[in-house]
């Protein structure tokens, strides 16, 4: 199971472009995701808490998340964009990690998708083309500039995260500023003008000095801090000689299969990525090969 | 071979954050990609034409593409952002397609990556967070807002493009407004809050009413109109009964293996995607399975 996947909501994207349908859904059946800034609020059962549209200011910007058809109904689900002044992109903090660890997987996916969207709106209230203010459109899946006519869409930034293997050992890195003993798979943004496979080869070479080949896809994950799409790959290294990029990485080490397995169990030489991270899924996948 | 991949240039991303190194590269050895707006200019050999930094206005915004180490040298390569007033996102026109068909594959990749980048700058001169003007930074791999401090990065928008197969036949669609007989694989943007596999299942269901499973990765492609990352998948359909989304699709048809093969050869029932499109690579891949 990949964390942040498996949202139970039907995105009903055909309704986004239909202002009458959107207006018609803003009724007593509509559910509003309860948030404190970008933090989720939980109900007495530890599930995501929901309010009604009566809970928000009349001029609040609303994002249509989709239709919840659980329990036989068809409830429109919305989230409100945080008010102005709350516009810095925020990473997850320890409180949020602890809270997310208790969430139902479907709730986690729903929260992650909603968070990415409303956080994007909060940080994109102006037109990048002309500087004028923009207005929310298409149920929150677009912002429109009424000054120059430009349309802007929520970002999803593809990031490669990759295993590199050499003679049965796995390359893992500790980024600059990470705690001692914390290791994960190398990762980096896919840039314009390259395939994902080329990005994998470039990133591994930049950070470790190692050339990799036979790059193959493993799995993907939406990552809402703020809006990454993690794309996990495996590759084989031609050599294990490291030339570490010290501007980005504190350490890179080749770990044996036994060391990776022990670390995933909590008693190995490094601290493994947390359960929410696709890096952990990739390591487990590698051990099962 | 995937079109727009295989750029011969070393991105040398470690130099982007080093203002002294960037300034030092802006010398007589530096090459400037010759462009007419966003159209490439060709030299007498049909290769991308290059000029020098003397060719541009002193206040032009320059993007550092990387180092060209062909012929034993190490030439810094740059491209200039089109001037203001030239800011609409433009698709490829027939002249550009004809020109690109003659380009060396490495030149095509280099042009595509450069085009995505400078086109992004031309359409993102203002801060989406506060509306102030922004300045180019990190050799063109960032724009910075000196008013609110926000940093903005070039977009790469992940798009799934997918084959759906049922009992040996392939689902292909003709979009609304496409020419008669032109069919391709279905495609759509990956949204916040979903894995790529979930996006494949959602898009196929939205456009065709068909549920697919066993979704597996095939290949990826950078697509510079304006900045997509095409991510190609194969899937198996549970059923072949179609419910076509008429707001997006003119037709969806299940084609046999023989019909797809004949169409790729130019004498089948449909007009296949052009050589540059990953959809064509996916169809060829499918026939080879």
Image: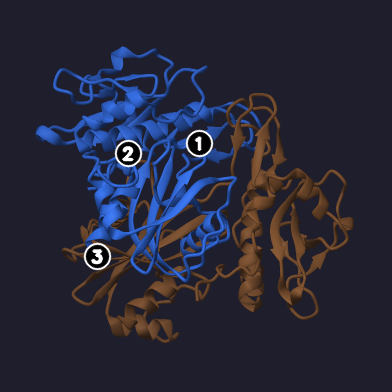
Chain colours: A blue, B brown
Q: Chain of mark 2?
A: A
Residue corresponding to mark 3: A289
Check disc 1: other Cα within 10 Å, few if <14, some if 14-19, many if 20+.
Answer: few
Q: Chain of mark 3?
A: A
Q: Chain of mark 1?
A: A
Earlier residue among tags 1 and 2: 2
Residue at image x 39%, y 30%?
A92
The answer to whether any part of residue B201 appears in the image is no
Residue A15's label in the rendered image is: 2
Q: Position of residue A246 (x, y in %)?
A: 58, 47
Q: Quadrant of residue B220?
A: bottom left
Distance from Cα at disc 2 to Cα at disc 3: 43 Å
Residue at image x 64%, y 59%?
B11
Q: Position of residue A209 (x, y in %)?
A: 55, 61
Give SS at disc 2: helix
Residue at image x 51%, y 76%?
B275
Say if B110 sits above or below B168 in the image.
Answer: above
Residue A177's label in the rendered image is: 1
Q: Which of the image's four quarters has the C terminus of chain B? A: bottom left
């Amino acid at each position: 199971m990949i964390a942040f996947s498996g949202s139970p909501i039907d995105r009903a994207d055909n309704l986004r472009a239909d202002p009458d349908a959107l207006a018609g859904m803003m009724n007593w059946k509509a559910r509003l995701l309860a948030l404190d800034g970008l933090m989720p609020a939980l109900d007495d059962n530890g599930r995501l808490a929901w309010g009604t549209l009566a809970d928000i200011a009349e001029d609040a910007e609303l994002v249509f998340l989709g239709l919840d058809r659980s329990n036989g109904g068809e409830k429109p689900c919305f989230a409100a964009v945080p008010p102005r002044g709350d516009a810095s992109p925020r990473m997850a903090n320890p409180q949020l990690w602890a809270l997310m660890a208790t969430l139902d997987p479907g709730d986690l996916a729903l929260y992650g998708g909603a968070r990415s969207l409303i956080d994007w709106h909060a940080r994109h209230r102006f037109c990048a083309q002309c500087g004028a203010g923009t207005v929310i459109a298409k149920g929150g899946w677009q912002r429109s500039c009424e000054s120059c006519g430009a349309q802007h869409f929520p970002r999803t930034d593809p990031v490669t995260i990759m295993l590199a293997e050499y003679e049965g050992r796995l390359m893992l890195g500790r980024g600059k500023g990470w705690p001692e003993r914390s290791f994960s798979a190398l990762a980096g943004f896919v840039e314009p003008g390259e395939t994902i496979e080329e990005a994998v080869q470039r990133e591994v070479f930049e950070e470790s000095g190692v050339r990799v080949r036979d790059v193959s896809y493993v799995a993907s994950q939406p990552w809402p801090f703020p809006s990454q799409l993690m794309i996990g790959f495996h590759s084989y290294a031609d050599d294990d000689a490291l030339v570490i990029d010290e501007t980005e990485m504190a350490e890179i080490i080749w770990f044996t299969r036994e060391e990776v397995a022990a670390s995933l169990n909590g008693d190995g030489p490094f601290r493994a990525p947390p359960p929410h991270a696709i890096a952990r899924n990739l390591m487990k996948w590698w051990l099962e090969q």
